[in-house]
Amino acid sequence: MGQTITEKILDDHLVEGELTPGEEIGIEVDQVLTQDTTGTMVWLQFEALEMDEVQTELAAQYCDHQTYQFDFKNTDDHRFLRSAAGTYGAYFSRPGNGICHQVHKENFAAPGKTLLGSDSHTPTPGGLGQLAIGAGGLDIAVAMGGGPYYVEMPEVVNVQLEGELPEWATAKDVILHLLGELSVKGGVGKVLEYTGPGADSLTVPERTTITNMGTELGATSSIFGTDEKTRDWLARQDREAEFVELSPDADAEYAETIEVDLSEIEPLVAAPSMPDNVAPVSEYEGTDVEQVIVGSCTNGAYEDILPSAKMLEGREVAKSTEMIVAPGSKQASEMLAREGWTAEMMAAGVNFSEATCGACIGIGHVPASDSVSLRTFNRNFEGRSGIEDDSVFLCSPEVATAAAIAGEIVDPRDLAEELGDLEAPGLEMGTKYSPGMGQDDADIIAPDEAIDDGLVKGPNIGDVPLRDSLDADIGGEALLKMEDNITTDHIIPATADILKFRSNIDKLSEFTLSRVDDTFAERAKAAGSGVLVAGENYGQGSSREHAALCPMYLGIEAVFARSFARIHKANLFNFGIVPLEIDAETYEKIEQGDDIQIVDDVGTGIADGTEEFTVSVNDEWEFTAELDASERERQILSSGGKLSWVKEQHDGDSGAAPADD
Ligand code: MIC
Ligand code: SF4
């Protein structure tokens, strides 16, 4: 039987299991990436695992989320990361050099290779044929040590693209359209594989906008085949030699096919405050806009920003509106600057930011109270912009720029008609400035250029907390009952005041679930232990393992949810918290404050493969909760988490062996 692109790459990298959807497989990881807010834990765990050297073909450490370094804690983190990258043999991308996904795409992403990253948008280079997956930091640390990455074999879904995008419609609108159709849960357990003439018509920057935001669908990954457009893009990056041809076999079988006719796509927005709250721009026309931001890892390439620059040529940003450009990489900034576009945009009233995640997680450019912000980003979860009750719309650079010109939400087609001389900017490919940049980039320190002598830890860099092996009795007070689609931004917010404690779990845990209930951490500490109750898709969003690590630190023993998001569920296993599924009726019946106790001996049940556990509530009624876990995940739970499990496995070992096989 023929294979899909995903199956071909997985087959090439398979070290354990079979490519049967739903079964756990172990794959070899070629490349890893990590960033500043997840990376400190990754390297502390790498150290705790007593690893000497990175074992993957390539590892890259980026400093992108908190590059303004408001606090010495951030700068200390960056210094630690540089020292860790140098000590263990990873590339180091300096703060300000750009967002991991964009910089990795420019410098290292390669078709046919596997990439694992401690950031949920790691699938971005799927747009050039790399199979890239986001994971928790501990999984990255283990993969860097040479261990396989274990994941449930996803279903491969074919997104068959027909036709071509009309003027003013963009790749961003394609992925927003899919979000509107499928919802933020629609991709869970799936890889979306884009094929068809419509896919062929898209350039690599357009494809990577789509694969980047496949994460918002909950997908394990998203991927396109490769073609002359991929080769051309790599050539523009001076990396043509890395081109590999990739396409599905003619008789490849997909679990499902979704057809999208690109010629019917129109400019869309995701309205506050969920990426799947999608509507045509026209529905919100006339809404005043105080802030517009173009950039991020979704739309921060040169090819994303250039259309904005062209639209603004000879025009001005409305006096009522502030417009910021936050490029995805310094390379994008440099290309725009060398061609004079930065000056043109500045003259039009645009404020240029350094290449950073920044505003995407509420670090800088926090919107004014009761105001609307239009952003070309990928997430608009409530409060993520840095102010509660925010009103953030997601859209394409074209829609954002039209709003900046008009001072209100407007369909760019209507604006073009009104102005008479505003032409659809289309997409023009850029070429990086000088040959010899790439891996020799001044802002990237290669492993053989390392400048630190050992790890440099500032006072804010704490220890990696461990949990004891699993108890026979699991349960406690339901300390919090939450609704559907709780994000990791709810569990551990990423805003500037909190982000600086990512390397200090004792302090960070004080903010646990503060966005749902700011008394939670205090109550959990006082109780000493307890459980959480949630609706569907619990833990969607980011890969931050802190969203499991901090609840563990506060004594949370189990989470009872209708369903879990993929990366968060893996993180719960990794930190020894039992993720149990409950049905709708049980969810309705449980109340916050209930005393919830698993009746069975959990330690034995987990070890012997029990899938259903009887749970008692207030000693008054009972329900059944399901544990969907592989043999390996059960062992991890029994050991009290992955770090202890890996250590147990390798006790007495030489230390150089892969950690996880
Ligand atoms: C995000 O977009 O939510 C983040 C911030 O990039 C996170 C990573 C983190 O929390 O450090 C992600 O996507 O995984
Ligand atoms: Fe950074 Fe935002 Fe992209 Fe996350 S989604 S990597 S915070 S730009």
Image: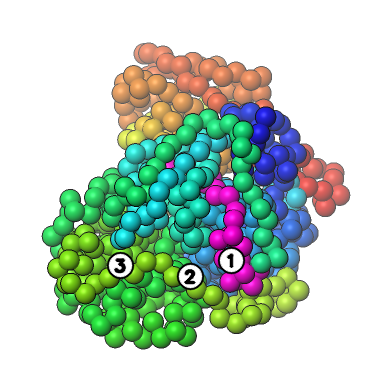
> Who's the residue at 76% across and 56% down the image?
55
> Who's the residue at 70% across and 65% down the image?
241
Task: Give the structural element (helix, strand or loop) at label 2.
Answer: loop
The answer to whether residue 243 is left or right of residue 381 is: right
The amino acid on which the numbered mark 3 sits, given as a three-letter code, is Ala
Give how far across and how far down residue 23 sits, in percent.
63, 29
Q: Which residue is mark 1?
A: 232
In depth, the one of 224 and 465 nearer the eye is 224
Q: Quadrant of residue 26?
A: top right
The amino acid on which the numbered mark 2 sits, given as a three-letter code, is Met
First-in-chain label (1 vs 2): 1
> Does the stretch in magenta take in 232?
yes
In depth, the one of 555 and 78 nearer the eye is 78
Q: Which residue is mark 2?
A: 429
Boundaries of the magenta span: 215-239
Q: CA distance from mark 2 to mark 3?
A: 15 Å
Q: Residues within 10 Å of mark 3 (few under 14, many from 20)?
A: some
Q: Are marks 1 and 3 in contact (CB under 8 Å)?
A: no
Query: Considering the image in quadrants, where does the N terminus appear?
Result: top right
The answer to whether residue 282 is left or right of residue 336 is: left
